[in-house]
Image (tube, rainbow, N blue to C red):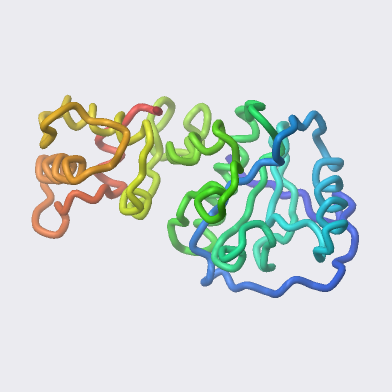
Amino acid sequence: MSVTIISRAQWGARAWNGTPNSVSLSSRTEYFIHYDGANSINRTGNSVPQAIEAEHRNQGWAGIGYNFVVDQAGNIFEGRGWGLQGAHCPGHNVSGFGVQIAIGGDQAPTDAALRAARALYDEACARTGRRLAMKGHKDGFATLCPGSRLYTWVQSGMPSPGGSGGSTGSGYAPFPGAEWFKNNPRSPLVTAMGRRLVEEGCSAYSSGPGPQWTEADRQSYAKWQYKRGFRGADADGWPGRTTWDALRVPNA
């Protein structure tokens, strides 16, 4: 999916009330997903970032605090963009891009919104030259944001509906990055991976694989790496893209 971003000028943003600090792409290491809060959002189009901008300015901010906003139609709106410091997660506004998907409460995100947010993530990785850590707002701050639906999606590696955001094609989970596993994840994706390792005869489990990443998962994955011909430090049990794509883990 190509990324088309609706600029601030196009959606009618007001001038900054004091320009936010600049941030180099080399400082970016994280990609945070947010939602709007307790209430469902029924609007789409330019009114989405305009409403957020008005709320944030009323809080005394320079303007909209997110780097980007995605509506339910899959439109991507520029907020602070690629080069300005966000105001979305204390302690992570320099290191992290903040992306709001414009839903609230238990509202379900559309496939179009998820595809757009995933495509924007891939673009962010391409621009920074690194695999950014996938995070929900609650990973950096005590909050319910981004809600259970979006947080489950983040924890599952932010798969793109239809497979367009991943590397393995429709139905298979895209590689979430080595750092995701090293952050001790608890996710249905870990269970799905473990089941595939068992199917491939690469089990180090004393009981069935579960959602919490454990040493047994790492040892099982090392067996898979060895089966694929990797040796030494290349078979350390931490998933890499080549062996992940070959494992063909179904979307959790």
Q: Which percent across, then down, holds residue 142?
A: 56, 51
Q: Which residue is drawn at 38% across and 36% down?
A: 187
Is 105 left or right of 12, judged from the image as shown? left
Q: Which residue is drawn at 47% across and 35% down?
A: 159
Asked if 130 appears above or below 135 in the picture, the reply is below
Give whichever of 8, 99 is nearer the camera. 99
Q: Which residue is drawn at 33% across and 49% down?
A: 184
Asked if 130 appears above or below 99 in the picture, the reply is below
Give whichever of 20, 77 is nearer the camera. 20
Quarter of the figure that contains the C terminus: top left
Quarter of the figure that contains the N terminus: top right
Q: Which percent across, then down, holds residue 80?
A: 72, 61
Q: Which residue is drawn at 80% across and 29% down?
A: 42
Q: Which percent across, then down, holds residue 207?
A: 15, 28
Is 237 left or right of 44, judged from the image as shown? left
Q: Which percent across, then down, holds residue 228?
A: 14, 42
